[in-house]
Image (cartoon, rainbow, N blue to C red):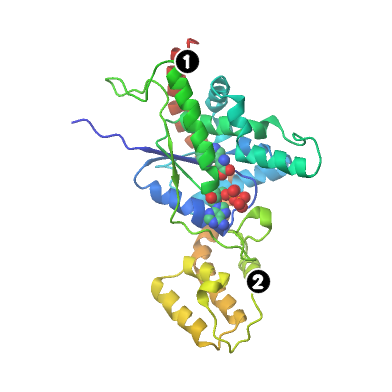
Amino acid sequence: MVALKKKVSLTGIKPTGNLHIGNYFGAIKPALELAKTYEARYFIADYHALNAVKDAAVLSANIREVAAGWLAAGLDAERVVFYRQSSIPETFELATLLMAFTSKGLMNRAHAYKAAVQANVEKGEDPDAGVNMGLFTYPVLMAADILLFDSDVVPVGKDQTQHVEMAQDVAESFNFNYARRDVADAEGDRLGLKIPSALVRENVAVVPGLDGRKMSKSYNNAIPLFCTEKQLRKFIMRIVTNSQSVEEPKDPDGSQIFLLYKLFTSVEEQAVLAARYREGGMGWGEAKEELFRVINRELTPLRERFNAIMADPAKLDATLAQGAEKARSIAAKTLLRLRKIIGIQ
Ligand code: ADP
Ligand code: TRP
């Protein structure tokens, strides 16, 4: 009997800043859930981060923190191929190959590039001011990340679906040129490029930040995933609230304190606290203390694992090197296949 091959799930996280609880619930947790049923390939998109982070010490610290963060959150590096993008030179060769199948017009339509141009135009500057080629060709590198590993699904947030669609377009254009459809030969080896699909986490709530907007490092409203208990309390105390008095009944669903509380608690706990909000008699200070208690309860073991991983950099490097080795053996095969197709052997 032929063993059925598991489908491949692949995603990358850009090390552009400290991980926050929005990243944890919105990206890390769901990706780890998928890793239970898919062949998972998760990586740190460090060359993508270079477009924005040009301080060497900051970039290398971010890379370590993101790697340690995934491991502390439960990524099992024995089962998940876990690596740094920069350790896979095949990615950059594939990106060069794909350039020849990517129309410039497609890149002109990328949201991130368009937003940068629009901001420049509004300021009366040159449309391409401050836009480097790394930003302009960002979707090609991302397509290479994805296509190199014959990914079936790419778990991403909504903002990234356009990039996955661009990877589809580029792969289709390659397959069309060589008249290779998305088919496998008798041995099951793929002939062209596999067309990936975005797996958008529709049911994952947008985690609100301290000011009620979407939590994001760019809004300076994030609760970090890893900080000391004391810092965590300070962040939570900064959550913006309205001026309702202690006595007044409060609407739990209208408060980001309660929305955050829901992420860390069982439905039973939520029902108990929601009733207290509605009764009145509980002030925002107490609601924040309750929130701190449940967040700290969940994050304490994560923080301890994170600190232990960060304290042993040699082990972390070895884990990433091992992942890179596994990833490269897959990547080398894909490139060999593609080089044959294009006539460069
Ligand atoms: P940021 O907005 O802080 O720059 P990123 O864009 O680096 O975060 O996001 C990395 C991943 O975390 C993405 O998959 C994104 O969908 C997810 N994510 C970020 N912020 C949130 C949030 N507030 N709620 C849910 N998911 C989030
Ligand atoms: N662009 C993604 C982001 O900003 C990160 C990323 C890079 C990625 N390469 C990828 C995500 C490949 C999925 C697949 O979040």
Q: Which residue is drawn at the image coordinates 59% and 59% (left, top)? A: 214
Asked whether disc 1 touches disc 2, contact meaning CB atoms under 8 Å apart, the reply is no
Q: Amino acid at mark 2?
A: Val
Q: Amino acid at mark 1?
A: Arg
Q: Is residue 25 above or below residue 267?
A: above
Q: Is mark 1 within 8 Å of ligand 2?
A: no
Closer to viewer: mark 1 or mark 2:
2
Q: Which residue is drawn at the image coordinates 37% and 20% (left, top)? A: 191
Front residue of 212 and 268: 212
Residue 285 in which image quadrant: bottom right
Q: State which quarter of the image contains the N terminus.
A: top left
Question: Where in the figure is residue 204, as x and y percent of width and height?
Answer: 46, 56
Question: Where in the figure is residue 19, as x and y percent of width and height?
Answer: 59, 53
Q: Is residue 114 left or right of residue 261?
A: right
Q: Is mark 2 within 8 Å of ligand 1?
A: no
Which residue bears the numbered disc 1?
339
Q: Which residue is drawn at the image coordinates 39% and 19% (left, top)? A: 180
Which residue bears the numbered disc 2?
240
Mark 1 Cα-neighbour bin, 10 Å: few <14, some 14–19, many ≥20: some
Residue 138 in which image quadrant: top right
Which image quarter has ligand 2? top right
**Res. 340 visible in picture:** yes
Extreme right residue here?
124
Question: Where in the figure is residue 13, as x and y percent of width and height?
Answer: 55, 44
Q: Disc 1 on helix, strand or loop?
A: helix
Question: Where in the figure is residue 207, as x and y percent of width and height?
Answer: 54, 60
Mark 2 Cα-neighbour bin, 10 Å: few <14, some 14–19, many ≥20: some
Q: Disc 2 on helix, strand or loop?
A: loop
**Res. 44 visible in picture:** no
Q: Is residue 274 above or below residue 40?
A: below
